[in-house]
């Protein structure tokens, strides 16, 4: 009988039967190792959670009073004889790849990752392994990110220009990750930074965790609108087109997402500017990251899994497509517009149930919940 694989794919998530724990399970389990705090990776209802120190306060904020153990990158934890350690994934603050080792066999689960140093998340580190489980959200050659310095130069000159033309600047990005990346890389001489409540709640959780963020001011009903209009507003996707946002008219609204690389995405989001800024690896980033693991086999969990798996097999990897419930934290509504891979229709990413739910019936604005935790945990303010 073939030896059982150290990690396997089950209907609850990625499972280690030797160690009796799951990684990013989407159904309640006893023992969950969490790569990062986005809603499609960190579900409510598990008995015990293990995550990185920097995820602590955001997880408590989003999931409530959970039983949570946190560790540093590289720190080893034993579960039933299986060694677990977390390593930087560079996706958002506190995001981790999970390395699992038993009797010399090593598996790494990437969670979500990007290879560019964003200046705020601990930079991605490639980990050697026998088997690598990878995301491939942007696993198409059309996705090639510019260095973020160029994107922020564009953002800064656009916001400067808005100010000169009497327009308020509204930058939209999801509340955990993109919002802080924007905040830390903006030219603050263009104005004070104001935040939507959902984003400020996440900022506060991160500050409780000891993360140093640039100063922000939460927008409340008492905030003077004229002052806000002279500054820079950071808002979550869920606020687009809302009465909350309309209060700041006239404004120019810029949307920060990897999906902005697709023609039509900006228009569909009714954005004045689309800034291609992603917390996921682009095509080259994915291939270089997978190659750097030296793995014997690679499993693709979410994104353009079918076409990307096929491509990796063509260039000599032993690649396998697997079905998971990990969604897309960038902006699920946009994936439907994504271009096909070499004209092959099976190339479109499989929309997860989460994505379908988000997009169904959303004839107008709110198919924007790239990150469901916001609606659940944050409320809108
Ligand atoms: Zn994520
Ligand atoms: Zn993901």
Image: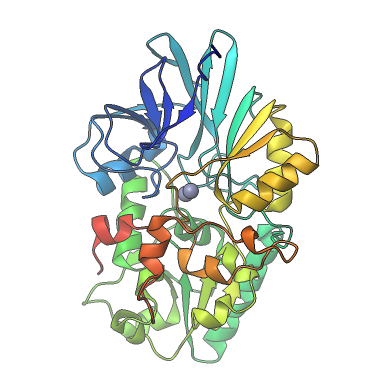
Q: Give coordinates of residue 380: x percent, y percent.
A: 26, 68
Q: Give coordinates of residue 357: x percent, y percent.
A: 35, 64
Give me the residue at 39% from left, 49% from top.
40
In the current view of this chain or complex, which residue is farthest to the left?
A: 65
The answer to whether 294 appears left or right of 28 in the picture is: right
Q: Is residue 370 visible?
A: no
Q: Quadrant of the C terminus?
A: bottom left
Q: Give coordinates of residue 125: x percent, y percent.
A: 63, 33
Front one among 265 and 379: 265
Q: Is residue 115 above or below residue 268?
A: above
- The answer to which image quadrant residue 51 occupies is top left
The answer to whether 64 appears left or right of 292 in the picture is: left
- What kind of colouring is applied to the model shown? rainbow
In the current view of this chain or complex, which residue is farthest to the front?
A: 1
Front one among 340 and 292: 340
Q: Is residue 2 above or below residue 33?
A: above
Q: Is residue 85 visible?
A: yes
The answer to whether 62 appears left or right of 19 in the picture is: left
Give me the residue at 36% from left, 70% from top.
238
The mark total stands at: 0
The answer to whether 351 appears left or right of 341 in the picture is: left
Give me the residue at 63% from left, 59% from top.
346
Q: Give coordinates of residue 86: x percent, y percent.
A: 49, 27
Front one among 2 and 225: 2
């Amino acid at each position: 009988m073939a030896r059982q694989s150290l990690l396997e794919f089950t209907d609850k998530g990625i499972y280690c039967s030797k160690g009796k724990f799951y990684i990013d399970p989407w159904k309640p389990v006893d023992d969950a190792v969490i790569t990062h705090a986005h809603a499609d990776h960190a579900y409510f209802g598990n008995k015990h959670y293990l995550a990185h120190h920097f995820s602590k306060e955001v997880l408590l904020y989003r999931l409530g009073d959970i039983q949570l153990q946190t560790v540093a990158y590289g720190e080893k934890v034993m579960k039933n004889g299986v060694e677990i350690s977390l390593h930087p994934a560079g996706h958002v603050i506190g995001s981790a790849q999970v390395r699992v080792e038993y009797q010399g066999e090593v598996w790494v689960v990437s969670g979500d990752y990007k290879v560019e140093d964003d200046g705020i998340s601990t930079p991605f580190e490639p980990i050697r392994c026998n088997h690598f489980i990878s995301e491939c959200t942007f696993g198409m050659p059309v996705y090639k990110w510019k260095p973020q310095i160029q994107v922020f130069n564009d953002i800064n000159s656009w916001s400067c220009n808005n100010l000169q033309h009497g327009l308020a600047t509204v930058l939209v990005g999801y509340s955990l990750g993109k919002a802080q990346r924007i905040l830390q890389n903006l030219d603050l001489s263009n104005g004070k930074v104001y935040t939507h409540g959902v984003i400020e709640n996440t900022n506060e959780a991160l500050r409780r965790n000891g993360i140093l963020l640039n100063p922000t001011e939460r927008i409340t009903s008492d905030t003077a609108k004229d002052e806000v209009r002279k500054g820079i507003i950071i808002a979550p996707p869920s606020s687009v087109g809302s009465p909350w946002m309309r209060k700041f008219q006239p404004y120019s609204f810029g949307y920060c997402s990897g999906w902005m690389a697709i023609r039509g995405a900006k228009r569909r989001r009714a954005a004045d500017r689309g800034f291609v800024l992603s917390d996921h690896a682009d095509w080259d980033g994915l291939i270089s990251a997978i190659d750097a693991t030296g793995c014997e086999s690679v499993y693709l969990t979410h994104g353009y899994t079918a076409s990307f798996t096929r491509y990796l097999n063509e260039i000599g990897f032993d690649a396998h497509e697997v079905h998971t419930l990990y969604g897309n934290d960038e902006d699920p509504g946009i994936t439907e517009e994504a271009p096909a891979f070499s004209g092959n229709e099976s190339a479109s990413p499989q929309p997860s149930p989460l994505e379908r739910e988000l997009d169904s019936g959303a004839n107008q604005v709110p198919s924007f919940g790239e990150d469901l935790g916001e609606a659940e945990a944050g409320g809108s303010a």
